[in-house]
Amino acid sequence: MQKNPYGFRARIGLIYIASAYAMDVEFQEMAPRGVTSHVTRIKLSEDPTRFTIEDLVELEGKALEATSILSQAPLKAIGFGCTSGSFVNGVQYDKALIQKMEAIAQVKCTTTSNAVVEALHQLDVQTIAIAAPYTKEVTDQAIHYFKEAGFDVANLIGLGMMNDYDISALDLKTIYDMAVQADHPDAEAVFISCTGIQALQVIPLLERDLQKPVLTSNQATFWHLLRLSGIHENMNQYGEIFDF
């Protein structure tokens, strides 16, 4: 047996969308010494090139089945890594999903949307701007979720996309420009929504240029899973949230 086995500080479980690939890579990049992440994938849709609101609503059952699979591993916490899939039915639905996951796994659980809410509370932010790749139908659900959670949304920019492969392929300039366009003088923080977006590298650039905290779906989920696992590492190269 290894003297220091993998994940000797914490092993984190992630339920992630099968057609995307940014989140697990960014989890690995952010992982501090002694922390590992372990992924089970679920289908977003039978056709990820044109997923629908109905597909997002149906993710709950898949997420719970994946929780059951992950729960056989010795994990500290489990996260459901899909922003739109966790905000689509509102805050109470999201909280109920977390409770169901915890009942199955017997460890602390979160979702991406819940993690973002917790991060915003930690930053003491009230008003946000949102940058997202989705269509208006989906972004409307995002606005409803964050307002229901008690936040003000000063502005939202959506790219009108419903092809998961195209979302995953967005380049850094597009992501950077989307966040800059979403920013608003009243916004105390900018949230870049979607676990398929490869935004980790632009966080420090945006925070310097916008002079405010920037959250992304992947970064906030990982931050919250670390905290749920009892890990409090200062990694502010990945954003101001890691100062806490």
Image (tube, rainbow, N blue to C red):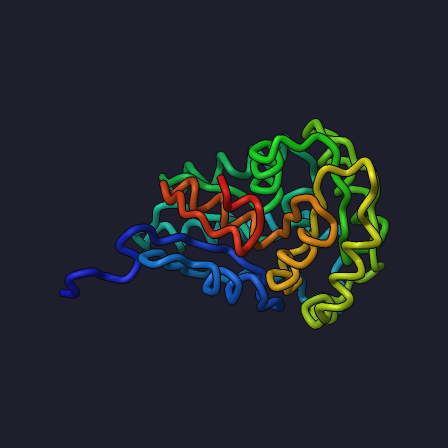
Asked whether the viewer can see residue 224, the reply is yes
Tell me the quadrant of the picture where the N terminus can be found.
Answer: bottom left
Left or right side of 75 for 111: right
Asked whether the viewer can see residue 47, the reply is no
Q: Is 168 located above or below residue 217 in the figure?
A: below
**Residue at 70%, 39% in the rendered image:** 89
**Residue at 70%, 47% in the rendered image:** 191
**Residue at 72%, 66% in the rendered image:** 167
**Residue at 61%, 64% in the rendered image:** 201
Q: Position of residue 237 (x, y in %)?
A: 53, 56
Q: Position of residue 11 (x, y in %)?
A: 35, 53
158 or 165, nearer to the observer: 158
Q: Position of residue 106 (x, y in %)?
A: 36, 39
Left or right side of 175 for 124: left
Residue at the farthest top position:
150
Q: Is 35 located above or below residue 188 in the figure?
A: below
Left or right side of 6 for 40: right
Identify the image quadrant of residue 147.
top right
Q: Is 43 located above or below residue 234 in the figure?
A: below
56 or 238, nearer to the observer: 238
Q: Position of residue 21 (x, y in %)?
A: 58, 68
Identify the image quadrant of residue 90.
top right
